[in-house]
Image (cartoon, rainbow, N blue to C red):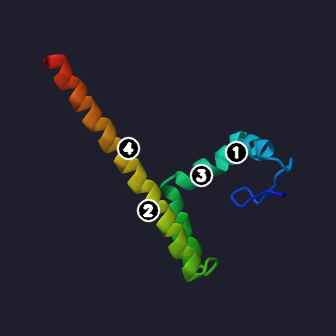
Amino acid sequence: MKYFCSLCRKAIKYKTPKGWIDHIRGVNHRQKRMFILKPELIKFINQMKKEKLLTHEEHTEIQKVLNNTEEIKKRIENILEESLIRIAHNILN
């Protein structure tokens, strides 16, 4: 089986699941993933659409992914806030 990372646009060196896991844990993959999650990327993507480097379909797909990551971040923040409130109530009682 051959693996290909669409994020890095790179073929995986070893054709095993371990090779895939090693790639995901690598520095280059992490840096590219972190770049995607940064808010200034939205401005960059909109600029690419204006310059017609991205099609409308590609732009909407990217926006969906970015919106989902923002929703996930908000959910995590809400869960953490609720758990802190619960812990504070337990300490007071």
In terms of sequence position, does the residue under pointer 4 or pointer 1 come before the other? Answer: 1
Residue indicated by mark 3: 35
What quarter of the picture does the C terminus occupy? top left
Q: Residue at x 65, y 46 (%)?
A: 31
Q: Residue at x 59, y 73 (%)?
A: 48
Q: In the image, what residue type sits under mark 2?
A: Asn
Q: Residue at x 86, y 48 (%)?
A: 13
Question: CA separation, marks 4 and 1?
Answer: 23 Å
Query: Which three-letter amino acid code belongs to the residue tagged 3?
Result: Phe
Circle 4/circle 1 CB separation < 8 Å: no
Q: CA distance from mark 1 to mark 3?
A: 15 Å
Task: Determine whether the residue tagged by mark 4 lies in a helix, strand or loop.
Answer: helix
Labels 1 and 3: the sequence-earlier one:
1
Residue shown at 60% from the left, 79% from the top = 51
Mark 3: which secondary structure?
Answer: helix
Q: Which residue is mark 2?
A: 67
Label 1 – label 2 distance at C-alpha? 23 Å
Q: CA distance from mark 4 to mark 2?
A: 14 Å
Nearer to us of marks 3 and 2 is 2
Q: Residues within 10 Å of mark 4 (few under 14, many from 20)?
A: few
Q: Position of residue 82 (x, y in %)?
A: 25, 37
Instruction: Look at mark 4 in the image and give the residue it sits on.
Output: 76
- Among the two numbered marks 1 and 2 on one chain, the one whose residue lies closer to the N terminus: 1
* First-in-chain label (3 vs 2): 3
Q: Nearer the viewer, mark 1 or mark 3?
A: 1
The quarter holding residue 91 reads top left
In the rendered view, does 13 fall on the left or right side of 74?
right
Tag 3 near tag 4, CB within 8 Å: no
